[in-house]
Image (cartoon, rainbow, N blue to C red):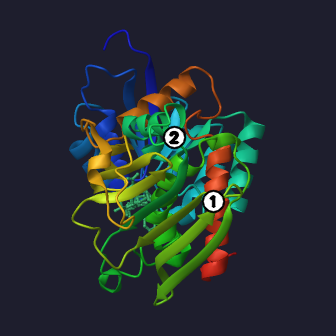
C-alpha cells in the first residue's frame, strides 16, 4: 500500500450509510488503487463521532468534530463525503462548496433538479469536484452489463426493461423524525429506492448516458400513506419506441427469485439478481440461437436460448469501486465523475420530478 496515492476524507454524519462507506474505505484490499484516510468526522454530537470512529475505523485516528461546518473548514480534508438525508443534501453541498471542498454526496443527490442545478452551478464557480454517490454505476457488474448490452449487443437491440425495488418497511412505527417519515428530509420511496430502479432502466435504455438530455415520455402513478409516498410505478417511453417500467415500494418484499431487473432485446434477454437492486450479484444472459418454430408463440422456448451466467464477487459492502474512482478523480484533478457525470444526475432528477408531478408528491419548499 506504501506507493499508493493518498486521499483524506472528511465524513459528514455518523448514520447508517456513513458507517457502511467508512467500513469499505478502510478495508484492507490487495487491489486498492488509493489509500483512503479518514481525516475527520463531523456529527451532531461528539459522542456519536467517538463511538463511530471506534467501531468503523478503529485503525485510524480521525479528527472528531461536533458540526459539519468544521469538516468543511478542515484544511487537511481533500474531499467531503455527505451522508445526510435527501432533504439536507442541497444545504450541505452548498456549505461544503462555499468552503472550497470537493464532494461526494449520497443519492438521491437533491430533492429536485432545480436544487441540483444550483449545486452544480456553485461547484463550477468554485472549481470543486462534486458527484452523486450512485454507487451502483461504479459496480463492475453494472459496467459489464452495459458493455454486453451496448457494445457487444449480446441480446441485439434493447427494446424493453423492467425493474423493481420492493422493501417492506413499517413506516407508521418509526419516529416522526425518521428520514422515511419526515417530508422535510425527503421521505418517500422514489427518492430512496426508486432511483435504483430508474438506474437499472437507464442501463438498458440510455446507453448514451451523460450525453442523453432528452427526457422520455413518462406516465406515472404514486400512492401515499399518511402523506408519505409509498409506491411508484412509472412507464418511460423513448422516441424510438423503447419502453421501460420502473417501480418501487416500501409496502412489499422483493420476489424470492431475487430477480429485480429484466432486459428484453431483439435477440434475447438478461435477468439481473441479487440481495437487492442496490446489491446486485449476478446476471444471466439468454441469447437466442434459433427459432424452434413452435406453433404456440405464447410458450417460453427455453431450448432456443444459450444461457450464460455472470457472477461478481462481493468486496466489502460494495462501495470500494465508488471510493477508488472518486478518489482518483479528485487526485487527478477532474471536477466531474466520468461514471456519474452531472448530466446523469440531472437527467434522473428531471425524470423523478416529472414522476412526482404526475404522482402528486410535493416536498416542503417546492
Ligand atoms: N448507497 C446506499 O446503499 C445507501 C444510501 N443511503 C443514502 O444515505 C443518506 C442517509 O441515509 P441513512 O444513512 O440511511 O440515514 P440515517 O438516518 O441512518 O443517518 C442520517 C444521518 O444524518 C444526520 N442527520 C442530520 N440531520 C438529521 C435529521 N434531521 N434527521 C436524521 N438525521 C440527520 C445524522 O447524523 P449525525 O447525528 O451524526 O449528524 C444521521 O445519523 C440518504 O441520502 C440515503 O438515500 C442510505 C442507505 C444506503
Ligand atoms: O440506498 C438504499 O439502499 C438500501 C435501502 O434499504 C435504503 O433505504 C436506501 O437508502
Q: Is 257 in front, or is 187? A: 257
Residue named by callout 2: 80
Q: How far apart are marks 2 and 1 (CA)?
A: 22 Å
* Residue underneath mark 1: 349
The residue tagged with tag 2: helix, strand or loop? strand
Percent across and percent down for residue 173 are 30, 84
- The tag earlier along the polypeptide, 2 or 1, is 2
Look at the picture and state if 120 lies above or below 164: above
**Quarter of the rendered structure image containing ligand 2:** bottom left
Residue occupying the point 78% across, 39% down: 125
Residue 195 seen in this snapshot: yes
- Left/right placement of residue 284 relative to residue 340 reads left
SS at badge 1: helix
**Image vertical order of residue 272 relative to residue 144, above or below:** below
User: Eyeballing the image, is 343 above or below 252?
Assistant: above
Crowd rating for badge 2 (residues with CA inside 10 Å; few <14, some 14–19, many 20+) = many
Q: Which of 312 and 350 is in front in this view?
A: 312
Q: Quadrant of residue 37?
A: top left
Residue 77 screen position, x and y as percent: 50, 32
Question: Which residue is at 27% across, 67% downward?
Answer: 255
Q: Which residue ends up furthest to the top in the rendered image?
A: 3
**How many neighbours does mark 1 have within 10 angstroms: few (below 14), some (14-19), or many (20 or more)?**
many
Place of residue 347 in the rendered image (x, y in percent of width and height, measured from the top left):
66, 54
Residue 17 x %, y %: 36, 53
Amino acid at each position: 500500500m506504501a506507493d499508493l496515492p493518498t486521499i483524506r476524507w472528511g465524513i459528514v454524519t455518523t448514520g447508517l450509510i456513513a458507517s457502511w462507506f467508512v467500513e469499505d474505505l478502510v478495508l484492507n484490499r490487495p487491489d486498492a488503487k488509493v489509500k483512503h484516510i479518514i481525516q475527520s468526522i463531523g456529527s451532531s454530537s461528539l459522542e456519536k463521532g467517538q463511538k463511530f470512529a471506534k467501531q468503523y475505523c478503529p485503525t485510524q485516528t480521525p479528527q472528531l468534530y461536533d458540526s459539519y461546518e468544521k469538516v468543511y473548514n478542515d484544511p487537511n480534508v481533500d474531499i467531503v463525503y455527505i451522508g445526510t438525508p435527501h432533504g439536507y443534501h442541497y444545504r450541505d453541498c452548498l456549505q461544503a462548496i462555499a468552503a472550497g471542498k470537493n464532494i461526494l454526496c449520497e443519492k438521491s443527490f437533491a430533492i429536485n433538479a432545480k436544487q441540483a442545478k444550483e449545486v452544480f452551478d456553485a461547484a463550477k464557480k468554485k472549481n470543486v469536484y462534486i458527484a452523486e454517490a450512485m454507487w451502483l454505476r461504479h459496480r463492475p457488474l453494472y459496467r459489464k452489463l452495459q458493455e454486453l448490452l451496448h457494445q457487444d449487443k449480446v441480446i441485439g437491440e434493447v427494446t424493453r426493461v423492467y425493474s423493481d425495488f420492493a422493501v417492506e418497511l413499517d413506516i407508521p412505527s418509526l419516529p416522526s423524525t425518521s428520514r422515511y417519515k419526515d417530508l422535510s428530509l425527503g421521505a418517500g420511496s422514489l427518492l430512496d429506492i426508486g432511483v435504483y430502479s430508474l438506474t437499472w432502466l437507464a442501463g438498458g435504455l440510455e446507453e448514451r448516458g451523460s450525453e442523453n438530455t432528452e427526457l422520455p415520455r413518462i406516465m406515472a402513478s404514486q400512492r401515499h400513506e399518511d402523506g408519505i409516498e409509498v409506491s411508484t410505478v412509472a412507464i418511460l417511453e423513448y422516441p424510438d419506441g423503447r419502453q421501460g417500467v420502473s417501480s418501487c415500494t416500501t409496502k412489499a418484499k422483493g420476489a424470492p427469485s431475487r430477480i429485480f431487473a429484466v432486459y428484453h432485446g431483439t435477440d434475447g434477454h438478461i435477468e439481473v439478481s441479487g440481495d437487492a437492486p442496490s446489491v446486485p450479484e449476478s446476471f444471466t444472459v439468454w441469447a437466442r440461437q434459433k427459432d424452434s418454430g413452435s406453433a404456440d408463440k405464447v410458450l417460453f422456448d427455453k431450448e432456443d436460448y444459450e444461457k450464460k451466467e455472470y457472477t461478481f464477487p462481493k468486496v466489502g459492502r460494495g462501495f470500494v469501486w465508488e471510493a477508488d474512482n472518486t478518489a482518483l478523480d479528485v487526485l487527478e484533478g477532474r471536477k466531474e465523475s466520468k461514471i456519474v457525470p452531472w448530466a446523469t444526475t440531472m437527467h434522473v432528477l428531471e425524470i423523478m420530478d416529472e414522476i412526482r408531478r404526475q404522482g402528486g408528491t410535493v416536498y416542503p419548499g417546492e
